[in-house]
């Protein structure tokens, strides 16, 4: 097994390609799929914002500010340091999901694991399925799996947020563009996994769905703009837009 084959197929994937057929092939394929999605989901369910707010500040971030377990709410309630560690923790868990998925099932496993990490971040099994909005986890997922797509989306995101100060607007637009740009890059280069298209659509749709309240506030012009600082009132900012 070469390193390139390992990255593309993973351990189980290479066993499948070695001539395995019949019931054994089916069992191994299901095992690889299950290991990828379960590991990704459990890693995603480790919510850094909730952990930091409980251990360091003695409260649950989901009872403060916008009540969202995300980086921007941590920034507004507890400040820059708390937000930074929240971001680093949630990026790292997505990286771990990517590694596990790749080892198990190559590029397919990486997509499955990273997507389920986003799902776990939004619906964490360890915290009664109340988590964040999944944007940072998705960003890490795109960076690891589709770096060219990530660069394009990052530029678009920065332009939108810089021009409007609405993180939610940038997140919504970029989420909608993700599957479109991914498909365009794949068609142009042929690089990547052909089955990833469905996962990009599901990921984008999930992020947009989580931002429905933000869309309503944007329409009503009541959505708060990004402010780099700590909120004076921890219980204020019900409409804050969380990057996570």
Image: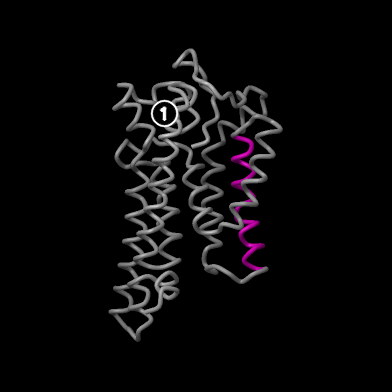
- Rendered view: 7 above or below 79: below
Farthest residue toward the right?
163
Residue 151: x and y in percent read 62, 52
Task: Tally the marks.
Answer: 1
Q: Is residue 212 above or below residue 100?
A: above
Residue under the image location 45 percent in, 33 percent down:
84
Residue ID at (39%, 22%): 63
Query: Nearest the camera: 227 or 21?
Result: 227
- As displayed, is residue 42 above or below residue 233? below
Please give the name of the residue rendered at 54% of the width and 25% of the height, measured from the top-left corner. Answer: 240
Q: Nearer the viewer, residue 222 or 139?
A: 139
Residue at the far top: name it. 232
Residue corresponding to mark 1: 82
Please identify the quarter of the rendering in which residue 27 is found: bottom left
Number of residues whose C-alpha sits closer than 10 Å to that of mark 1, classed few (under 14), some (14–19) or many (20 or more): many
Residue 217 image offset from top left, x and y in percent: 61, 27
Q: Nearer the viewer, residue 130 or 160?
A: 160
- Magenta residues (range): 168-187
Looking at the rendered image, the quarter that the N terminus falls into is bottom left
């Amino acid at each position: 097994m070469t390193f390139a084959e390992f990255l593309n197929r993973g351990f189980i994937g290479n066993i499948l390609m070695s001539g395995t057929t019949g019931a054994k092939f089916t069992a191994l394929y299901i095992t690889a799929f299950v290991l990828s999605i379960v590991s990704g989901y459990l890693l995603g369910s480790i919510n850094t914002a909730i952990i930091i707010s409980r251990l360091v500040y003695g409260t649950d971030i989901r009872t403060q500010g916008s009540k969202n377990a995300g980086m921007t709410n941590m920034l507004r309630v507890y400040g820059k340091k708390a937000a930074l560690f929240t971001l680093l923790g949630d990026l790292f868990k997505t990286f771990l999901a990517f590694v596990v998925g790749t080892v198990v099932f190559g590029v397919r496993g990486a997509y499955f694991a990273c997507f389920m990490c986003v799902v776990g971040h939004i619906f964490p099994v360890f915290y009664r399925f109340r988590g964040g909005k999944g944007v940072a986890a998705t960003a890490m997922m795109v960076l690891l799996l589709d770096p060219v797509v990530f660069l394009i989306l990052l530029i678009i995101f920065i332009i939108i947020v810089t021009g409007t100060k609405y993180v939610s607007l940038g997140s919504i637009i970029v989420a909608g563009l993700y599957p479109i740009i991914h498909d365009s890059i794949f068609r142009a280069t042929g690089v990547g996994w052909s089955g990833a298209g469905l996962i990009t659509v599901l990921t984008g749709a999930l992020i947009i769905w989580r931002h429905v309240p933000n869309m309503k506030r944007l329409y009503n012009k009541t959505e708060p703009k990004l402010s780099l600082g700590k909120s004076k009132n921890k219980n204020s900012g019900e409409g804050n837009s969380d990057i996570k």
